[in-house]
Amino acid sequence: MKKLLYLFAIFSLMTSCVSKKNQAIKQNILTLKDSYCKAPFQYNYSKKLPSYNSDSILSANKELKGTFSDQSILILNALDNLDEVHDIMKLKKDSSLSAQVKVLQLKTRINSKITIALTELDAVAAEFDCEGERVAQIGSYVDNLNSSRNNKLILYSIVAGAAASIAGGIVKDGGWSSAIDIGGGALGAGFGLATLNPKGKKVEFVHQRNLLRDIWHEKLESPNFPPFIWYMYTEKKFSNKESHSIIQSMKQRWLHYQFDDNQKDANSSVIFSDGGYYRADDLQNRAAMLNQMQSATRTINQNINYLLLDLDKLVL
């Protein structure tokens, strides 16, 4: 009897520790539930997008092709700087000091637009990065909840088996002793099987400003992205193969790798909503998708870098 009391004392102590850990985890989840990545000031970007008629733009600016790549010409058009470039080309024929000063003034005007574009890229990439970190943090807490749950069930299984063994030793009647052993074994096995739950715990996660929703719908439905960034995402000329835009290629990968090519599941996923209850797998998918978009956003810097090199060739 003393052994049984001792066993229950240990059990009570261990479950108390697990309970305190769960309370701490749940408190941390509350602090992460709503986004801290949103900028304190919401800038209302113009919803006017640059022209997607890239072939016409390139055809109308054939004289620039000796100095600028097609992508650089399209970026200049998106930044509304084509007139400045044409003026520079005319002024380069004049070697006077006043013409050189005007060239530098025009280049400064172009550089100003490029600087704004670069800061927009950095801001969007930073928010993707921040959201990815937030998802990763809450994902680790859900993993801890699932781990604590499994630890509890393993503990219950051990205690059930030990209690049955002790009780079986105390009870002298052979029939009752066998029944206790069988019942304890079944109970322990039940707790063990419960740890195999593949889905685990759910946690509420809110993201009303959902950066991934516009990407999935391929439509700028919110003020989440500046028009220039959205243009770079959606103009096919800026993708590697030029057959799909950056976000079209991204969507194809998400559908295949995150949703096993199940379009219906993807469209109804909590990932593209205002938020809801997430399981660990959903959080891992969301974190991966945010990180992929962060990388895709940063690669646009390469296009702008090539534009700056082309611009220097024109002015020098």
Image: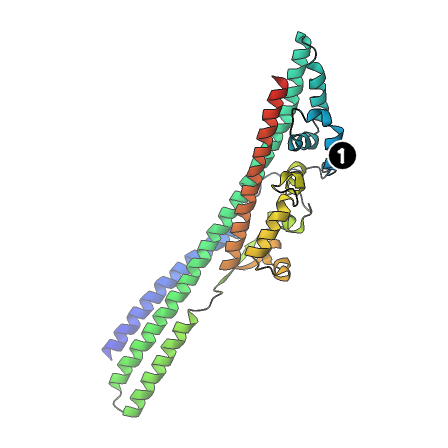
Q: Residue at x 41, y 65 (%)?
A: 149
**Which image quadrant for residue 204?**
bottom right
Q: Secondary structure at mark 1?
A: helix
Q: Residues within 10 Å of mark 1 (few under 14, many from 20)?
A: few
Q: Which residue is mark 1?
A: 56
Inspect the image, locate mark 1, and give the three-letter code of the amino acid beneath it. Answer: Ser
The x and y percentages for residue 295 are 54, 42
Q: Residue at x 64, y 16 (%)?
A: 104
The x and y percentages for residue 187 are 38, 78
| 286 shown above or below 237 | below
**Which image quadrant for residue 123?**
top right
| 269 shown above or below 212 | below
| 184 shown above or below 118 | below
100 sits to left or right of 126: right
Locate the C terminus and report the quarter of the image it occupies.
top right
169 sits to left or right of 109: left
Q: Is residue 191 visible?
A: yes
Q: Residue furthest top?
A: 96
The x and y percentages for residue 51 are 74, 37
Question: Residue 131 or 16: which is nearer the viewer?
Answer: 131
Question: Residue 104 or 134: which is nearer the viewer?
Answer: 104
Q: Residue at x 58, y 25 (%)?
A: 309
